[in-house]
């Protein structure tokens, strides 16, 4: 409070209200001058009118997906569409449809006109909605409304042309892809048919007949291997018997050899007994020895015959074993080939199914794209643009506003007048202070002024009395004045 009172007292001391009452016309003149400037500005400045409209932009995806009938708010989509509206392509199309009224004194190129339109256009997507607000400013209200209407119309045409060109390219690409898939399907069907032709009827029952055949062949191979082992044992025993010279019991089927061996064993027993009883030259001993030699010769002959038979049988079984092994190997190869063929057939069948599903999907998409093309030809589109407001010609300008400009000019003129008064008050205070500080110099200067005024009056009176003596008196007065 003390600061406020001290500032007010200092201001009252600084500003002399008598001076304000004396020079009030300065404040009035400055205010009048400011108001006149405002009048001139309002008269010279062209008014600016703003036309505005709101549109709803929705991406329904017409003809492509049935689930796109209801769309949610997409911030990126609206931002993209806002840039499309302000794009040079849309604005150039609008300028060609509705040319600007150009000033002949200042011609502008098309790019400059498009830049001016873009500067006057405002496109603002409303938050969390599918609504875009468009405003356009122009000195002509009808031109502003017409320009805004032209921009929206050209934007819709631009979208329709983009969708048509995109849909046409998509249809061409999908048709090419469909023809390629049809060729792949035909090739796969030919491969399957060839595999089916090359595969016999037995390969269809691989898991049943082939397994039973393999069991029979394996069982027979085991039997032959056991026979071969038995024959080899008999040959070894026979060879050992021949080497030792003593007959042995063989697990063979030769009845003659068994009978010879039995007789040979009996003759050898009789020879051993006769050797103990008779002498070396006894006839009975000699007959027994002869009988034993004959039996040994017969045993040797039968052993040779048996060995030949055993070797022939062994060779026969070995050949059969090799044949069985070859059959088993061929059957395994056949089974492997059959399984590979069956695997290739299953793989081709799976690939054919996959390609057929892809072909059906592309055919469905192609049909949808053709429906979309028909919709576009009928005037529809996947991006729907609808107006929320009607196009209304603005009646009042947004600038300049007369009332605010007059108020501001009055306030500024009054403040300028008050500033002049403050300057006069400051000057008067400064002069009064200087007169107080130097009173002697002030009195002397005033005295000299009075003397000069008196001499001047005297000269005028003398001139009026005697004009002829004007020159001599002037010289005299001039000398006195200098004295």
Image: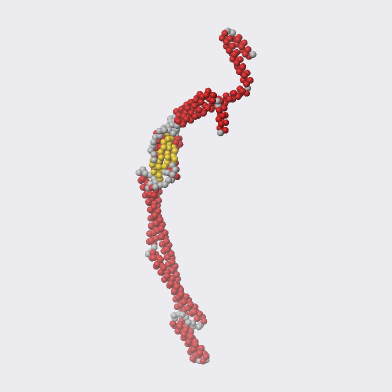
Instruction: Say which residue appears at 39% left-offset and 55% top-offset.
Output: 356
In the image, residue 388 sits, relative to residue 179, either above or below, namely above
Asked where in the image residue 99 lies, by quadrant, the reply is top left
Instruction: Give coordinates of residue 122: x percent, y percent.
Output: 44, 38
* Front in this rendered view, residue 241 or 353: 353
* Front in this rendered view, residue 203 or 347: 347
Instruction: Give coordinates of residue 230: x percent, y percent.
Output: 46, 77
Q: Give the total number of marks visible in the rendering.
A: 0
Q: Quadrant of the N terminus?
A: top right
Instruction: Say which residue appears at 38% left-offset and 38% top-offset.
Output: 390
In the image, residue 231 sits, relative to residue 60, either above or below, namely below
In the image, residue 421 sits, relative to residue 177, either above or below, namely above
Q: Is residue 381 left or right of residue 421?
A: left
Q: Is residue 232 visible?
A: yes
Q: Quadrant of the C terminus?
A: top right
Instruction: Say which residue appears at 46% left-offset and 75% top-offset.
Output: 226
């Amino acid at each position: 409070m003390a600061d406020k009172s001290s500032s007010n007292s200092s201001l009252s001391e600084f500003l002399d209200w008598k001076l304000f009452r004396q020079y009030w016309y300065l404040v009035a003149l400055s205010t009048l001058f400011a108001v006149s400037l405002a009048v001139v500005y309002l008269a010279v400045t062209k008014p600016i009118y703003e036309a505005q409209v709101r549109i709803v932009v929705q991406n329904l995806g017409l003809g492509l997906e049935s689930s796109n009938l209801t769309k949610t708010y997409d911030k990126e989509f609206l931002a993209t569409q806002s840039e499309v509206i302000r794009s040079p392509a849309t604005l150039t199309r609008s300028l060609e449809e509705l040319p600007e009224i150009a000033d002949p004194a200042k011609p502008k190129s098309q790019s400059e006109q498009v830049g001016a339109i873009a500067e006057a256009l405002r496109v603002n997507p409303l938050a969390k909605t599918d609504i875009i607000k468009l405003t356009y400013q122009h000195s002509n209200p009808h031109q502003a409304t017409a320009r805004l209407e032209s921009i929206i119309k050209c934007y819709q045409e631009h979208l329709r042309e983009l969708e048509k060109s995109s849909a046409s390219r998509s249809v061409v690409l999908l048709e090419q892809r469909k023809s390629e898939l049809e060729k792949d399907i035909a090739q796969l069907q030919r491969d399957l048919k060839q595999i089916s032709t090359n595969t016999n009827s037995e390969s269809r029952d691989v898991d049943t007949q082939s397994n039973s055949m393999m069991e029979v062949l394996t069982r027979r191979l085991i039997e032959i291997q056991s026979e071969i082992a038995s024959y080899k044992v008999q040959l070894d025993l026979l060879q050992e018997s021949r080497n030792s010279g003593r007959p042995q019991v063989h697990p063979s089927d030769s009845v003659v050899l068994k009978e010879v061996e039995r007789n040979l064993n009996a003759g050898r027993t009789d020879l051993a007994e006769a050797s103990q009883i008779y002498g070396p030259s006894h006839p009975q001993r000699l007959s027994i020895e002869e009988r034993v030699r004959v039996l040994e010769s017969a045993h040797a002959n039968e052993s040779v015959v048996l060995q030949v038979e055993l070797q022939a049988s062994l060779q026969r079984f070995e050949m059969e074993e090799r044949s069985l092994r070859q059959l088993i190997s061929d059957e395994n190869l056949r089974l492997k080939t059959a399984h590979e063929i069956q695997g290739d057939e299953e793989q081709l069948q799976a690939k054919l199914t996959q390609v057929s599903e892809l072909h059906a999907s592309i055919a469905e998409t192609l049909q949808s794209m053709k429906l979309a093309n028909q919709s576009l030809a009928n005037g529809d589109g996947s991006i729907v643009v609808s107006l929320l407001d009607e196009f209304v010609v603005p009646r009042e300008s947004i600038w300049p506003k007369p009332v605010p400009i007059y108020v501001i000019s009055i306030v500024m003129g009054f403040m300028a007048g008050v500033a002049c008064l403050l300057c006069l008050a400051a000057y008067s205070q400064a002069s009064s202070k200087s007169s107080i500080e130097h009173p002697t110099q002030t009195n002397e200067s005033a005295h000299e002024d009075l003397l000069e005024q008196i001499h001047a009056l005297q000269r005028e009176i003398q001139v009026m009395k005697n004009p002829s003596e004007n020159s001599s008196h002037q010289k005299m007065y001039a000398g006195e004045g200098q004295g």
